[in-house]
Amino acid sequence: MQQQYPFKQIEQDAQTYWDDNQAFAAKVDSEKPKYYCLSMFPYPSGKLHMGHVRNYTIGDVLSRYHHMKGFNVLQPMGWDAFGLPAENAAIQNNVPPAKWTFDNIAYMRKQLKSLGFAIDWSRELATCQPEYYKWNQWLFLRMLEKGIAYKKTQTVNWDPVDQTVLANEQVIEGRGWRTGALVEKREIPGYYFNITSYAQQLLDDLDQLTGWPERVKTMQANWIGKSVGVRFAFTHDIKDANNRLIDDGKLWVFTTRADTIMGVTFCAVAAEHPLATLAAQNKPELAAFIEKCKLGSVTEADMATMEKEGMDTGLTVTHPLTGEAVPVWIGNYVLMSYGEGAVMAVPAHDERDFGFAKKYNLAIKQVIANADATFSDEAWQEWYGDKTKATCTNSGKYDGLAYEAAVDAIAEDLKAKSLGDKQINWRLRDWGVSRQRYWGCPIPIIHCDDCGDVAVPDDQLPVRLPEDCVPDGSGNPLNKLDSFINCACPSCGKPAKRETDTMDTFVDSSWYYARYASGQSSESMVDAETNHWMPVDQYIGGIEHAILHLLYSRFWSKVMRDLGLVNYDEPFANLLTQGMVLNHIFSRRTDKGGIEYFAPEEVSLVHDEHGKTIGATLLADGQPVDFQGMGTMSKSKRNGVDPQSLIEQYGADTARFFMMFAAPPEQTLEWSDSGVEGSHRFLKRLWNFGYALSTEAKTEIPVKLNSGLANARREIHLGLKQATYDLDRQQFNTVASSGMKILNTLEKVQKEAEQDWQSVAHEGLSILLRLLSPLTPHIAQTLWKELGYGDDILHASWPEALEAAMVQDQIKLMIQVNGKLRGDLEVSKTTNKEEIERLVVTQECVTKFLVDGATVRKIIVVPNKLINVVIG
RNA sequence: GCCGGGAUGGCGGAAUUGGUAAACGCACGGGACUCAAAAUCCCGCGUUGGUGACAACGUGGGGGUUCGAUUCCCCCUCCCGGCACCA
């Protein structure tokens, strides 16, 4: 053994040992409980960043801990390998995306291995491999057969930068989720997955996910957006230029407050609604208003502040229950994309309708009474909102009915007239999966002039993506590749054209976890082994996937289940969303008014005498720089830290330990170079302690230890108990703390060098190494072996905190007087309550308060903790 | 506006069922070693007053329950995340 913590040697040796023994290959074992631990697979962008290191360290800690606890652990890894960055890199460097991607994978795999993760590399996959994406295509065809996948031409979100379609989920505040470009509307044919038909299940099954963070479930529920109400129609005889009735003479609307239907005083339609279009034909001012609405509805800044504006179409429709004529307005607040693109307006009982009616002087008719309040302009919000308190009034036959009864009765009457019924509306839209991109999974369809769109037969799958294309930035290069496009129609044999659209890459990542868990045969998508490992026991990844990836994966699992491929409802039993990695941001205003950023290592902090940071200066010129606080690591702000240089300077164990120690896993982690050094210091001390310990003097712990050693042993076992508790609740920062405390204790004992200390030290170190091995596996494995505790620490059982070591003969009880801490009292553990009460009132810290006639009113004894003497 | 999560020393953060607030680490100050520096080790470190023993205050603010509240209840402020003219 060498002194001075030779981490490079230690880590290389340990990794070689694991490789040689295939230490992490997972095989089905019915004797042990299974634990499928999965971290979200990375996009092979080039090299790992700190977010990856944190993500995979969390997964590795859980995997190794469960391994030692006797679980049969599966921890696989792979690559989310299709996607746009590869195409952009191809354009820049004139390299085919395939080569770029596979080169990146090779480098990043090496990086992952250098971090010592307990990964079963035999299950590695990349989504750009035909053996994998074949099954995207195969399942796509099954979905097509079932009607879950279908083709339609629809107005879509078009990202002008990436030149492709985006799903609704990928549009964030009117901009592309990746490019940030303003999304345009285009009419394009494409394939869709009928995710809305699973909306109810996706909503209901959130209740099964007790191991998911509440906020993720809330976000998904909001996104699915269930809304229960009534869809009904106003009738009319409005005809277009060809004398045809518009929409068969019906203006359909959706409402969640059918109980207020008798209070309708106007209707509002979206600018794109057919009635609006018709009304604008002879009225230029209406046409101009419609144009204004269409323009204004795109950007999110306007959306929030936009005035409710409208214009009368001059048209009227007939109320289905009262028969009254109801004027139709165009309202800029009505969305064509939700419900029917038209709403009934009840100004007395809806905030927006109220504002609109006030502005344009439209009628307001109260139809809801509330026992607690009366209607007035100022106070209406107070009582309008609570439908549970409302009863109908001024509503003819519905008077006196409460909300639910009124809705039922009204829906019934509308149904009788074939003018409406109860309906559920969803915010969730079907998932458009066609992308006009090259580097993705080809959609297995052939277009034939005679037969139309024909599915590629199963025996011709996969439709292979040519891997030698270099995109030039002008759309999808497959469109120019005759060898790909031209083919024979599988149905009639005539020349036909292959579909060139590829699938959304979220399809690839919707089922990779199931493929890892299967035998990965070329004959089937998944096999029986999948059902053994699934569902994933612990899934770990970033919060940014709270909606997109997690919702799509849940949907995909249900489709696979309904096709009889798997037997689980939900793919991820427990979800841990790890926090981001932040670092200091330093900057300066430049002369030209721009901002210049400085890397943290170029800056020196200035402290006052208390150690408080009061400023920062640039090392190069000694002049002050602005400290902008913490932000996510990014190239542009120059505050990134490269994992590779960290590993080279301090080693993987230090990197892993610091990551776990600096913050609990779900919280943001603030990078600190001195914190990294502190972690390194700790591992150095650990190494030195192990190095100094003789391997010969290992003896049994004597029954009777002197008090110093007994206390030390007690602290070690208490630390172990705490660390185990913290691992079980996934709070790893305090696991690291416990490890540090145990080493502190061991070092103290070593200094006193009392009799029997070797046996206590060996027991303590063997506990400490096992406790640390999930966090810092290399040093733990090496010391474990060198000190002769065993060959492989991964196969050592998790240590048990011994009660016998933790009990103490003398207990220190804290003394409170009226709830304030005043002193302490040492007693034997056998002392009973009465004796303690008798003793405590003789203590000086208590008696000094028994003056001026004050007496002891009450004594509260909390066993093993404290005594509170109430004096008054 | 609605939903979810927060606020604890100079900093990151601990405190398991209501029971010693600030564990562990970083930063800072002092000391030892050294020609010197680095490394390492030792001591101190919530605020205020006091030479000191000690006392008062102290977990965003205000109130409450309790022998006892960072923890439970009510009200308020601020911060982070998500959703949103959703009818």
Image: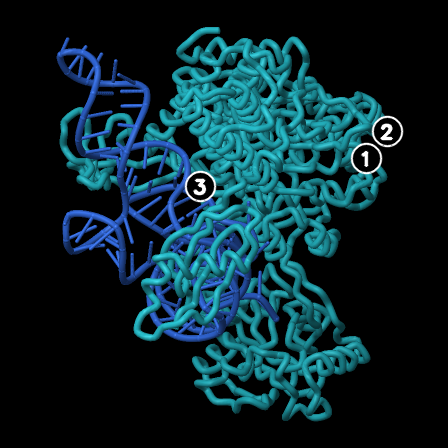
Chain coloured blue: B
Mark 2 surroundings: few (<14), some (14-19) or many (≥20) residues within 10 A: few
Answer whether labels 2 and 1 touch (C-beta < 8 Å). yes
**Quadrant in the rendering for residue A396:** bottom right
Q: Amino acid at mark 2?
A: Cys
Which residue is depicted at the point 76% across and 33% down? Answer: A33
Which residue is depicted at the point 42% across and 56% down? Answer: A815
Which mark, residue A450? 1
Q: Earlier in the sequence, mark 3 or mark 2?
A: 2
Q: Earlier in the sequence, mark 2 or mark 1?
A: 1
Q: Is residue A411 left or right of residue A9?
A: right
Residue A51 appears in the picture as rendered: no
Chain coloured cyan: A
Q: Which residue is mark 3?
A: A668
Q: Which residue is mark 2?
A: A492
Q: Position of residue A712 (x, y in %)?
A: 48, 31
Residue A252 appears in the picture as rendered: yes
Mark 3 surroundings: few (<14), some (14-19) or many (≥20) residues within 10 A: some
Q: Position of residue A281 (x, y in %)?
A: 54, 68
